[in-house]
Image (cartoon, coloured by chain):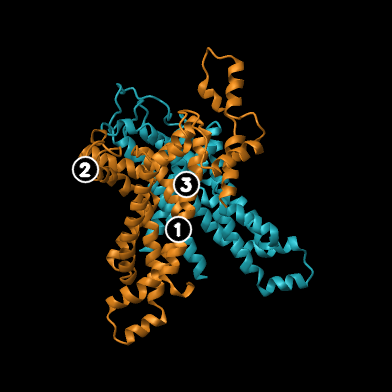
Chain colours: A cyan, B orange
Amino acid sequence: MTKILSRLAYIFLATILAISIIVPLLNISDPNAFSPLFTGDPLPPSSHHLLGTDDLGRDLLTRCISGAKISLAVGAISVTISVTIGLILGLISGFYGGIIETCIMRIVDVFLAIPTLFLILIIQVMLTPSIFNVMAVIGLTSWMGVTRLVRAEVLSTKENPFITAAYARGISKTTILFKHILPHTLAPVIVAAVLGMGGAILIESTLSFLGLGVQPPNASWGNMLQGSIAYMTDAPWMTIIPGILITLTVLSLNIIGDHLREKIFRK
Amino acid sequence: MLLLITIISFLIMRLAPGDPTQMYLDPKMGAQDIIQIRKNFGLDDPLPIQYIKWLKNAAQGNLGYSYSTGKPVLTAILERLPATLILSISSLICILLIACPIGLYIGSHRNQWPDHIITIVSLIAMAMPAFWVGLMLILFFSLKLDLFPTSGYLNPMLSDAPILTKITDIAYHLVLPLTTTVIGGIAGLIRYNRFNVIAILSQDYIQAARARGIGEGTILLKHAFKNASLPIITILGLSLPDLIGGSLVIEYIFSWPGMGQLGIAAVFQRDYPILMGTVLFTSILILIGNRLADLAYRWVDPRIR
């Protein structure tokens, strides 16, 4: 069953990715264009607008597609940032130890004790909200898990005989760190990155929902939900559809992450 | 630890652009008035001095005054604390009460259909944004079925009512926010618990108990459960920040008058003292939670007493 699930997850993610890249290139419809049928109330799903329109008469399907691109990009880039920071700090603290390690791990503890969302909200309200700020802020506040993970990996890899052998051959510390230890930490880091991307998409949607993330007229799944609350009784599709997309995407990422982890552990 | 948290949050808040005096801007005010306001709030001092001043006052129980309402921060937070505690403690209890038996059951009946269904459902629950779950619950249970109120805490008409009526009213308002937090927090724990139970059931002492002819139910409840509950406590302690962070948005959606709602409002108003206060209090809550988790650990596991 897990096999079917993970296959479905790969297919879904690939489809979303393909659609979000190809469709905007075809230039079929503008996500900010207003429907000619629009009279003031959100239009329900019909043959003209497969998923209906939002409160301004913009086609929901087109906006979902252009939102997919932004949500996925925010997820991917913020994870790249957090993984890079986590990797560097984890390598340093695991390899060199001593005071540096204590300092870094203390900072990790402190950041872990402040609710991430709170921290992001505080920073985000100070900056002018934009897509790049969202990416940076999410990346800069979610590196702690990777740091811990990498440090633990480095600590266990360091004890291997082949590292002692490398020292004996007179290889420099930096070379050992990057050529012999780093590759061993990469597998779990990739798993953490895939799972972290799901988390980043969730945070992005929350931020945009509160109006502190991706700003209109750009569409993201989160900010599409922001405007939908007022229309929940009359136009529930505006709330339901972007949420389902977020859930399915994050679900796929989580399943793929689990799948990768199982593969690594089986080795 | 707390000290470091306050330093970091203080720095982030003060280094960021944006000025709380803008809240008071009034066309009639001149530059002189703004300088005066800044002076009154102590915003002209160098940062370390501002911080030490805040810390000194905080140690004496004075967390400053809200920039927007002028209320003492401590009072504002203490007003909101009960609602937050009701929500977070009741959701913790619900999560434990639901996740433990389910995890135990599907862990011991691995790869049967309840296991598959619960695994898939909990995967989905983990992937849903908490605020969207809240919105969906409002959509179906409040707007469509009209079973529960969309938001609020205590009906203002009932402020003079007897205590029992008040409690039922709060509980009535609590249902939806509680369900939302439970859905968000429970899935991971069920999965974790299942994994644990599976690992424990394959251990030698369980085999030994089976060999002695002890019933499967007794083995599960008496032998496996205690060992499986140990890591749950740790995980629960570790997931506290997420739980409290997640309830920020949930409180906001359901207009639940807790600290999260206060904090979000303060974020939008650049109300530094309130923000500092809420960050401090949430951190304290989290540290207390971790401490309690440690104590519970000792209580469950006699080996580390």
Pointer 3 chain: B
Q: Secondary structure at mark 2?
A: helix
Amino acid type assigned to the residue bearing label 2 in the image: Thr
The answer to whether A244 is drawn above or below residue B68 in the figure is below
Amino acid type assigned to the residue bearing label 3 in the image: Thr
Residue B40 is situated, as x and y percent measured from the top left of the image, at: 58, 26
Residue B146 is situated, as x and y percent measured from the top left of the image, at: 20, 39
Q: Label 1 vs label 2: CA separation?
A: 33 Å
Q: Secondary structure at mark 1?
A: helix
How crowded pointer 3 is (Cα within 10 Å; few <14, some 14-19, many 20+) is rated as: many
For this view, does B291 lie left or right of residue B120?
A: right
The answer to whether A253 is drawn above or below residue A239 in the figure is below
Check disc 1 and report the residue beneath it: B237
The part of the image, by quadrant, that contains residue A68 is top left
Query: Which residue sits furthest top?
Result: B28
Q: Secondary structure at mark 3?
A: helix
How crowded pointer 2 is (Cα within 10 Å; few <14, some 14-19, many 20+) is rated as: few
Same chain for the residues under marks 1 and 3 in the image: yes
Q: Nearer the viewer, residue A228 or B111?
A: A228
Which residue is painted at 63% across and 64% down in the image?
Answer: A154
Observer-side mark, 1 or 3, equals 3
Observer-side mark, 1 or 2, equals 2
Amino acid type assigned to the residue bearing label 1 in the image: Gly
The answer to whether B85 is drawn above or below residue B30 in the figure is below
Check disc 3 and report the residue beneath it: B282
